[in-house]
Image: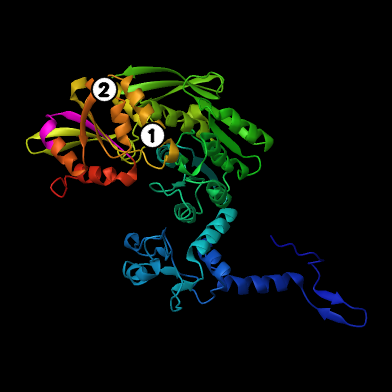
């Protein structure tokens, strides 16, 4: 914001002994015209040129999306050549141009009219994204928590896109690379931006939420995910609370009233004078809570109480984690929109995110099986939820089979939490529990004997199990941490690449 103080309507300046013809107004207009020759109609180009001081870049360059993966570049995209843990993006600049990139941000490169050369590409992307955030009026919603971040982001992003312009981060772009990249892809006409913020150690959520500066912060729940870098779960809860410090003035915090760390997060938010909105599956003190579910043919009618008024929506699934995400999404939307005016089917066509409980029919030789894909990741809370959902699936129990892999990144808590998972499974009607991995053996040993399947020595034995032990129309749930490789295996199964395994 520029303030020019003076008597701008006068055409002269009187110095007593002489008069100087000078107009503030004409001088301003002349310099605006000069500036406009350098400026682009694209705000992102202006920000990039200004913070890099790269005046040689053509202001008429078009940029659509930004990417740090040269293989995903399309015509008029911008490529940020970032040096990551495994790959150096500077080696893929030519590939990015071949795929149609209109602009590349890189280091250790020869300058050109289509390149901006900087010392640190990731820092430059982060700075540019932060500048863009400051210059847009979009309402930013940032989601953190131990479980359900991606699923909630997908549900919220797809729903808001039906009633407004909204951008939301793809997949699980929730780290120091994904967050600034997602933010940079925010569009000037977006009313909403929805971003996921993850962590595996203290300070990361503070760093990322400072970039995003959310209008609304969301903490889904607190569990033992990534606890290997913390002494106890209370420290995990405090690390998640870092998002509260960076919510904008007069902003909002959405909390799960059923979470055991709700009171801690409420107290921190109250000290910051943040507005708190709550949701719950059972607690009537929440702003939004579940009242009743009615089955209507192929639909479920979910009746909720929202700020002491009753309304309802139709959904496909009433698994507990899906209901939590539904209530959280409604709570967030209610901050900006009149929930009563939303179409009752607005959530009905939502499809579960891949790897988080989606069901795929796979043909194998002369039989068909259903893969219940929970392979994206696993931690104590998400495993408990997946087990509960599978147990409630309305098919004959003998048709249900499970393959469980390790829950990773649990540090010194690993044995204890894997043992507790066995106790949780023993409370269900599930049998045929097969395991693959090192830590999951603690779960297996804690199972009732009649529930135990087989111990698979490696992932190749999974194929033998599917071929030999599964019958036509059986349901197989596969659950394990991403790093176990189960997710990659399941993706090949679902796409028919069975022989490749």
Residue at 26 percent across and 47 percent down: it is: 488
As measured in the structure, the alpha-carbon distance from the residue carrying label 1 to the one carrying label 2 is 22 Å
- Looking at the rendered structure, the secondary structure element under dot 2 is loop
Question: Looking at the image, do the residues carrying marks 1 and 2 touch, with CB atoms under 8 Å apart?
Answer: no
Residue at 53 percent across and 66 percent down: it is: 48
- Looking at the rendered structure, the secondary structure element under dot 1 is helix
Residue 97 lies, with reference to residue 478, above or below; the image says below
User: Residue 161 placed where, x, y %?
Assistant: 43, 42
Residue 30 lies, with reference to residue 222, above or below; the image says below
Toward the left, the furthest residue is: 366
Residue 93 lies, with reference to residue 181, above or below; the image says below
Task: Using the rendered image of the protein, determine whether residue 190 is visible from the camera's viewpoint.
Answer: yes
Q: In which quarter of the image is residue 388?
A: top left
Q: Residues within 10 Å of mark 1 (few under 14, many from 20)?
A: some
Q: Is residue 451 magenta?
A: no
- Quadrant where the image shows the N terminus: bottom right
| Nearest to the observer: residue 470 or residue 50 | 470
Ranked by sequence position, the earlier of labels 1 and 2 is 1
Instruction: Say which of marks 1 and 2 sits in front.
Output: 1
User: Residue 182 placed where, x, y %?
Assistant: 46, 52
| Nearest to the observer: residue 493 or residue 467 | 467
Residue 168 bears which disc, if any? none
- Name the residue tied to disc 2: 430
Q: Does the magenta stretch include residue 475?
A: yes
In this picture, residue 488 sits left or right of residue 144: left
Q: Give the residues in magenta.
A: 467-480
Q: What is the image's colouring?
A: rainbow
Residue at 47 percent across and 40 percent down: it is: 227
Toward the right, the furthest residue is: 16
- Name the residue tied to disc 1: 415
């Amino acid at each position: 914001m520029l303030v020019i103080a003076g008597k701008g309507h006068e055409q002269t300046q009187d110095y007593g002994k002489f008069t100087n013809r000078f107009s503030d107004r004409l001088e301003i207009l002349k310099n605006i015209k000069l500036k406009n020759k350098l400026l682009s109609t694209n705000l992102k180009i202006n920000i990039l040129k200004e913070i890099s001081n790269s005046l040689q870049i053509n202001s008429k360059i078009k940029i659509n999306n930004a990417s740090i993966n040269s293989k995903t570049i399309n015509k008029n995209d911008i490529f940020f050549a970032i040096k990551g843990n495994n790959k150096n993006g500077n080696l893929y600049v030519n590939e990015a141009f071949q795929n149609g990139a209109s602009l590349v941000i890189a280091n250790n490169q020869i300058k050109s009219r289509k390149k901006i050369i900087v010392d640190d590409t990731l820092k430059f992307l982060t700075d540019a994204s932060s500048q863009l955030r400051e210059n847009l009026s979009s309402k930013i919603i940032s989601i953190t928590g131990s479980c359900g971040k991606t699923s909630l982001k997908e549900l919220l992003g797809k729903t808001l896109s039906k009633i407004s312009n909204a951008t939301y981060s793809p997949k699980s772009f929730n780290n120091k690379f994904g967050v600034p990249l997602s933010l940079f892809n925010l569009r000037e006409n977006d009313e909403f931006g929805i971003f996921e913020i993850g962590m595996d150690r203290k300070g990361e959520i503070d760093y990322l939420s400072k970039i995003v500066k959310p209008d609304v912060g969301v903490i889904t729940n607190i569990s033992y995910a990534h606890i290997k870098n913390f002494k106890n779960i209370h420290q995990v809860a405090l690390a998640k609370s870092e998002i509260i410090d960076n919510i904008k003035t007069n902003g909002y915090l959405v909390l799960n009233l059923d979470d055991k760390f709700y009171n801690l997060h409420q107290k921190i938010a109250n000290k910051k004078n943040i507005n708190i909105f709550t949701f719950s599956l059972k607690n009537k003190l929440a702003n939004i809570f579940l009242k009743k579910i009615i089955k209507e043919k192929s639909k479920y009618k979910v009746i909720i109480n929202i700020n002491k008024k009753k309304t309802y929506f139709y959904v496909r699934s009433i698994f507990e984690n899906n209901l939590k995400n539904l209530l959280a999404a409604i709570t967030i939307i209610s901050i900006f929109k009149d929930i009563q005016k939303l179409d009752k089917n607005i959530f009905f066509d939502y499809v579960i995110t891949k790897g988080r409980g989606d069901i795929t029919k796979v043909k194998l030789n002369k039989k068909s099986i259903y893969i219940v894909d929970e392979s994206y990741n696993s931690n104590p809370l998400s495993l408990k939820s997946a087990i509960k959902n599978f147990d409630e699936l309305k098919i004959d129990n003998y048709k249900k089979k499970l393959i469980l892999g390790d829950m990773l990144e649990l540090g010194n808590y690993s044995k204890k939490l894997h043992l507790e998972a066995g106790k949780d499974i023993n409370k269900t009607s599930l049998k045929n529990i097969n395991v693959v991995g090192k830590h999951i053996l603690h779960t297996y040993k804690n199972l009732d004997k009649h529930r135990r399947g087989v111990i698979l020595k490696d992932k190749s034995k999974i194929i033998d199990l599917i071929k030999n032990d599964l019958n036509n129309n059986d349901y197989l749930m596969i659950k394990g941490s991403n790093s176990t490789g189960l997710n990659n295996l399941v993706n090949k199964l679902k796409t028919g690449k069975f022989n490749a395994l």
